[in-house]
Image (cartoon, helix red, strand yellow):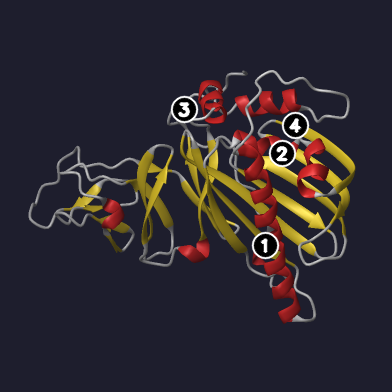
Amino acid sequence: MGNNAEARQNSFKGYPRGWFVVSFSDELKVGDVQTLNYFGKKYALYRGDDGVPRIMDAYCPHLGGSLARGKVNGDSLVCPFHAWRFGPDGRCNHIPYSPRIPGKALVETTPCKEVNNIIFMWHDPQGGAPQFDVPVLPECDDDEWMPWVHAKLRVHTHPHELVENVVDVGHFSPVHRTQVEKFENEFTGHMAKQINSGVAYPIGGGVDKYHIEATYYGPGFQISRWDGFMEARLINANTMVDTGSMDLRFAVMLKRGKDARQTEAFQKGYVENMSKGFQEDIDIWMEKRYVENPVLCEGDGPFHKLRKWYAQFYAPAGVTP
């Protein structure tokens, strides 16, 4: 384990509290069951016949069969080992060879919601209920907008690296060759906002004079409104696999143009640019060292404010770090 991972494990014990992306809606059809390996645990994600996605612990309390290898029955999940069936509340509601169901036949469930054609799980190490909501993007139900085009990377670092980009105005030019002309940050409760205007240079060439407002809603995901050559909505989301790695998901949707084929090509190009940009960041993260008390200068972003904001999601609920 390198200095980078060690420093983060020392600075951030365990896992943060918040909403985290586990899938896009088009990745989970009715009747599907998937394995989720997040926050050092294994979960089963399934979509019932009623169309609702649900998450529960992966292991059956009977003899430990993996529910993530089970089958959907109505709104319930059936264990593949002995066919015990568990409902949306986690309680066993059917055992094919027993008229009586033990009172302890219960699987822990995790709050899950589908918003903006994305599936989120709530994670709180203390087991608390959700403290804030996922904002609704009306564009997701607007036929004038394309559906999400999305991608995922496994990154072997702590998501703190990613989140610090929200204040790191100084890295845009040397790392991403973007000319920043205006840059501001706002911190309000569980939200951290970046307002950024400038000039970007896409992979395909040309110049994109842009204005972006990007907001983190808790530590797990950021929604961005990009106004440039085309109107776009972006999301990037981090979900910790363990204390040293995360799944980084990112997606874009564009407002439909007169030429559908051209709009699809632009949307694909946006995702390629996002992937390239994140890879540029990753190359830095893999070789850098985490500095707990950085020597900052005039012109740097408000790193200390960002770190204090981020720390609230590791502190017990209701405690100011």
Q: Which of the labelled discs sits on residue 187, or is there none?
A: 4
> In the rendered structure, which amino acid carries the disc numbered 3?
Gly
> In the rendered structure, which amino acid carries the disc numbered 1?
Glu
Alpha-carbon span between mark 2 and mark 4: 14 Å
200 vs 119, left or right, is right
Q: Pick the residue in front: 269 or 71.
A: 269
Quadrant of the rendering where the C terminus is positioned: top right
Q: Quadrant of residue 110?
A: top left
Give percent across and percent down for residue 211: 85, 52
Q: Look at discs 2 and 4 and give the one toward the viewer.
A: 2
Q: Look at discs 3 and 1 and give the one toward the viewer.
A: 1
Residue count near mark 4 (Cα–Cα under 10 Å), binned few <14, some 14–19, many ≥20: some
Q: Is residue 53 among what the camera can see?
A: yes
Residue count near mark 1 (Cα–Cα under 10 Å), binned few <14, some 14–19, many ≥20: some
Asked if the residue under mark 4 is in contact with the one under mark 2, i.e. CB atoms within 8 Å, the reply is no
Earlier-in-chain disc, 1 versus 2: 2
Residue count near mark 2 (Cα–Cα under 10 Å), binned few <14, some 14–19, many ≥20: some
Q: Pick the residue in front: 198 or 291.
A: 291
Name the residue that disc number 2 marks: 165
Q: Look at discs 3 and 4 and give the one toward the viewer.
A: 3
Alpha-carbon span between mark 1 and mark 2: 19 Å
Q: Look at discs 3 and 2 and give the one toward the viewer.
A: 2
Earlier-in-chain disc, 4 versus 1: 4
Q: Which of the labelled discs sits on residue 315, or is there none?
A: none
Earlier-in-chain disc, 3 versus 1: 3
Name the residue that disc number 3 marks: 14
Earlier-in-chain disc, 2 versus 4: 2
Q: Is residue 317 among what the camera can see?
A: no
Earlier-in-chain disc, 3 versus 2: 3
